[in-house]
């Protein structure tokens, strides 16, 4: 043994030992931190109306295997109390639990306008954390009686308006001066502005949201927003100003197809400002007949399809400030309250989420230019312009151009997509519309004074302001470009509801466009609240006998009594449960889902076959380039097969929901019906000799296979039919439409042919996602042949052909997947090192925290870095020839509890791991 000669070394060694001892002592927390505290999955939300809101937090730690064993939540009515650790609203005490998401508040009943401050402390297997930083939420107005104001508006049009097909209605400006009699402690505004509003106090715009609030079926539900405006108010005189836009309330088409298009009346509003003074007194300012209103302001018309017209000469300078002369303004009408029930908006607001700098401007004629943004986007154009009073600039928008460089607008149908700006003159003017957006890549600029340059414009991207949760990159540039196109397409179609497209005279929340798509999208954006709101929209649209629509909110009155479009209701609720652990949509909508299924059964089920289908496998790749829908019967799939298979799948989901909600009687009913449907289905559609369903289209075989309807012994053979069809007949090309594409990539992979899936995504010829990229698409198309099809239905920015593609990217290529119903508390990580791919770098910010998976392949050498959040665990599958070929390079000295070998399985070594970071190397 070596002697320690140097006394300093001895001292250092002792110090080291004591540091080690100290850090291993019982209860020493390994840098545990609590982050991202959320209430109802929102960060510090104001004005919510969930009376038992659910709280979630993320745990980070710098060591492996940290598991929460208990939590302690404090909720206080003031920050002072919370700081003093007094949870006067709720002190949960130590609750033994590993739940760190969706924990329901169980404190004192919460009443209107209550402010709630909260924090959390946890106990783990590795020690106890400190208290988290504080977070907060506040309650909205919980009872109808809490609203003291009156609905105001102007139920009429003015000479410059036009209440026709191409409706034009100017914005209405409201103002109210009031006196705040003492020093202000707190001021809160609750507002409903239908269809859209902007709120100002003393000329300051309140909030960063635009185009508020989220559209709903106004006959059923009205959303209100809440703002803390304390810092905008002052003692003495103040002014509130609001502007109302039309949105989906006063719809884009008036007095036109009234049976199809629902419209709700002239814009109207309800506002309540509650003020608390430092002297303890309170007062409210509410909408009533003492307000003033004018429709003669600068926004001359605003129509989501046709554009906005703005006359800067009509600007109402200082209208939202004290002392403005409003003598010519009108007294508002006290209008009828809309039928819908008031509810807090608990999904994120729309915002300007990105800026796109234009690429080029090309001169068309003396007066006209075409500008290329370089990206198909949804939002608006901000323009800088200098000229003389009365000059007019016209901006028209399109997704593509014709060969001669002019805009191609045929695929926009009758949407006029034109903004007009009339200059006031005298200096630089900066403008963008307020209440309309466009889906565009190209802009025609007419009448711009002087020569416009790209520096005079910027594209402002307008969509729901959601956290971007996913990052995804591979060694294959095409795979990355497809991802990028999906990212732009998804965000473009989020407008407080998921839309089909952002550009033509449609922009409707068609149900099937976001079925499994919602699941794909959930990896890219935190879409939990948006989709939870959408399930409410769908229930709102249900008819009393049970019918569900094709479009919800039902702005178009389409009830085709189809199975596949309304199926989205259940598919989305399942997605929310799986990805976010949100059980509420299932619990809340269970009865309505069941009612719909029973309605369909009663009306359309004959001998256990559903005999009603409307859309088939919508938009399969057609046989000739100009077609929208294929006429080839071999390409389409039998509608009764689709409807019956879907019905069976939905019963499976109902069975799952009934288990979650503990409804044993229902489970029995679903199981019995499912068994009968399966038998009838196979009898009707399955050819036991050829092992093919119906006409042997990929979708015909795929649905029964993925939905577990195929006789067990024949699964391989049926899959073989799919393989043959894709590989041999279709020469490794996709042949599915909106229905089949939802299950395709996972099916191929689950059945051992990830290579075919990879081939489909690597194609650049027709039909493929890569074909779109190759043709210069920067978003997804509505049709596989979107470059050649007839214009009637040929959007360049639809996401319905996304299907399960991004689910496959994340779950299969990257190996980031939750165990069923676990919301990433438990994961299954099984990456696919597809032939031709050298690396994948992916991360996903799950509701439990950040998950990372990056793998690299170099010949036979495989390396994989993963990281899963504290309080989670995973079963991972390391691609490897044998267990001894696997090493965890960070493991040295780590405990068995971090990492446990389970078994070898189909070329992979399976381990159970607990939270933390790991770095594996193996030979494949
Ligand atoms: C929409 C689609 C929708 C379909 C159903 C189209 O016009 O844009 O996305 O799903 O109609 O009919």
Image (cartoon, rainbow, N blue to C red):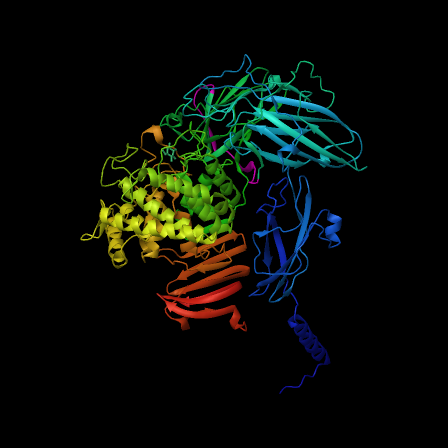
Q: Which quarter of the rendered picture does the N terminus lie within? A: bottom right
Q: Residue furthest top?
A: 159
**Percent x, y for residue 651?**
37, 48
Quadrant containing ligand 1: top left
| Quarter location, residue 157 | top right
Q: Is residue 542 visible?
A: yes
**Residue 769, relative to residue 882: is it above or below?**
above
Please provide the residue range marked out in magenta.
Answer: 346-367
Quadrant of the drawing holding the C terminus = bottom left
| Magenta-drawn stretch contains 859 | no
Name the residue located 61 percent from the left edge and 17 percent from the top edge: 314
Q: Nearer the viewer, residue 511 or 860?
A: 511
Q: Seen in the image, is 6 located left or right of residue 208?
A: right
Q: Is residue 836 left or right of residue 853?
A: left
Residue 198, position in %: x, y? 61, 29
Identity of the residue furthest to the left in this view? 689
In terms of depth relative to the viewer, which is nearer, 628 or 862? 628
- Picture residue at 43% right of the left edge, 70% below the top: 902
Q: In the image, residue 830 lies at what x, y percent?
A: 41, 60
């Amino acid at each position: 043994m070596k002697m320690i000669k140097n006394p300093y070394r001895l001292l250092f060694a002792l110090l080291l030992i004591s540091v080690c001892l100290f850090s291993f002592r019982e209860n020493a927390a390994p840098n545990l931190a609590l982050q991202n505290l959320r209430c109802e999955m929102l960060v510090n939300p104001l004005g919510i109306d969930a009376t038992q809101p659910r709280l979630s937090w993320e745990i980070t730690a710098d060591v492996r295997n940290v598991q929460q064993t208990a939590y302690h939540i404090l909720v206080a009515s003031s920050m002072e109390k919370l700081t003093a650790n007094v949870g006067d609203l709720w002190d949960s005490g130590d609750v033994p639990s590993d739940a760190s998401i969706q924990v329901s508040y169980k404190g004192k009943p919460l009443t209107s306008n209550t402010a709630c401050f909260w924090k959390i402390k946890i106990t783990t297997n590795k020690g106890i954390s400190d208290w988290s930083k504080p977070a907060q939420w506040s309650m909205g107005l919980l009872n109808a009686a809490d609203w003291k104001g009156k609905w105001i508006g102007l139920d009429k049009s003015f000479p410059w308006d036009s209440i026709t097909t191409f409706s034009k209605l100017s914005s209405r400006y409201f103002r109210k001066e009031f006196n705040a009699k003492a020093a202000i402690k707190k001021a809160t505004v609750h507002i409903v502005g239908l269809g859209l509003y902007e709120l100002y106090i003393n000329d300051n715009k309140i909030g960063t949201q635009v185009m508020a609030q989220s559209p709903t079926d106004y006959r059923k539900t009205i959303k209100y927003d809440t703002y803390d405006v304390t810092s905008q108010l002052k003692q003495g005189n103040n002014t509130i100003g609001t502007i109302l836009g039309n949105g989906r309330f006063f719809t884009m088409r008036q007095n036109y197809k009234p049976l199809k298009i629902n419209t709700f009346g002239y814009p109207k509003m309800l506002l309540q400002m509650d003020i608390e003074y430092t002297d303890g007194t309170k007062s409210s300012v509410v909408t009533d007949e003492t307000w003033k209103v004018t429709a003669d302001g600068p926004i001359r018309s605003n129509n989501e399809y046709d554009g906005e017209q703005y006359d800067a000469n009509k600007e109402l300078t200082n209208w939202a400030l004290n002392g403005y002369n409003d003598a010519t303004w009108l007294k508002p009408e006290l209008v009828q309250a809309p039928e819908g029930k008031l509810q807090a908006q608990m999904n994120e607001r729309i915002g300007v989420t990105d800026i796109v700098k234009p690429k080029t401007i090309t001169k068309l004629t003396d007066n006209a230019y075409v500008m290329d943004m370089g990206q198909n986007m949804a939002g608006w154009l901000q323009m800088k312009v200098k000229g003389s009073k009365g000059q007019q600039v016209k901006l028209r928008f399109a997704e593509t151009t014709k060969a001669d460089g002019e805009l191609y607008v045929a695929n926009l149908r009758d949407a006029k997509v034109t903004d007009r700006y009339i200059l006031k003159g005298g200096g630089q003017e900066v403008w963008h519309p307020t209440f309309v957006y466009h889906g565009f890549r190209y802009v025609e600029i007419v009448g711009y004074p002087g020569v416009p340059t790209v520096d005079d414009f910027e594209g402002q991207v307008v969509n729901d302001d959601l956290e971007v949760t996913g990052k995804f990159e591979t060694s294959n540039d095409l795979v990355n470009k497809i991802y990028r196109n999906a990212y732009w397409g998804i965000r473009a179609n989020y407008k407080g509801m998921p839309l089909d497209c952002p550009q033509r005279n449609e922009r409707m929340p068609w149900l099937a466009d976001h079925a499994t798509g919602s699941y794909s999208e959930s990896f890219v954006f935190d879409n939990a609240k948006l989709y939870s709101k959408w399930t409410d929209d769908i229930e709102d649209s249900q008819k009393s006998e049970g019918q569900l629509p094709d479009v919800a909110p039902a702005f178009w009155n389409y009830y085709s009594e189809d199975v596949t479009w309304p199926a989205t209701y259940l598919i989305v609720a399942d997605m929310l449960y799986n990805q976010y652990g949100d059980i509420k949509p299932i619990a809340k909508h269970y009865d309505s889902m069941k009612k719909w299924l029973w309605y369909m059964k009663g009306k359309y089920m004959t001998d256990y076959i559903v005999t009603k289908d409307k859309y088939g496998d919508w938009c399969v790749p057609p046989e000739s380039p100009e077609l929208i829908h294929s006429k080839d019967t071999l390409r389409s799939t039998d509608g009764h097969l689709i409807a019956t298979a879907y019905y069976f799948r939905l019963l499976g989901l109902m069975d799952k929901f009934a288990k979650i909600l503990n409804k044993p009687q229902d489970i029995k009913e679903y199981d019995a019906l499912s068994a009968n449907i399966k038998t009838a289905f196979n009898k009707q559609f399955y050819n036991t000799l050829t092992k093919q369903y119906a006409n042997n289209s990929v979708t015909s075989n795929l649905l029964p296979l993925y939905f577990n309807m195929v006789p067990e012994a024949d699964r391989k053979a049926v899959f073989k039919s799919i393989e043959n069809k894709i590989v041999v007949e279709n020469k490794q090309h996709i042949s599915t439409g909106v229905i089949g594409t939802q299950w395709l990539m996972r099916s191929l992979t689950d059945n051992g042919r990830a290579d075919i899936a990879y081939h489909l995504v690597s194609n650049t010829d027709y039909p493929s996602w890569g074909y779109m990229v190759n043709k210069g698409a920067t978003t997804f198309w509505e049709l596989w042949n979107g470059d050649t099809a007839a214009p009637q239905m040929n959007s360049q920015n639809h996401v319905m052909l996304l299907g399960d593609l991004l689910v496959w990217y994340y779950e299969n290529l990257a190996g980031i997947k939750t165990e069923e119903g676990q919301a990433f508390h438990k994961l299954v990580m099984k990456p696919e090192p597809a032939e031709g791919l050298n690396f994948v770098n992916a991360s996903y910010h799950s509701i439990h925290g950040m998950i990372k998976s990056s793998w690299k392949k170099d010949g036979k050498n495989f390396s994989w870095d993963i990281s899963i959040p504290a309080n989670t665990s995973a079963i991972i599958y390391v691609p490897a020839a044998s267990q001894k070929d696997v090493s965890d390079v960070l493991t040295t000295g780590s405990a068995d509890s971090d990492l446990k070998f389970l078994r070898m399985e189909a070329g992979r070594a399976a381990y159970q791991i607990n939270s933390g970071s790991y770095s594996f190397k193996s030979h494949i």
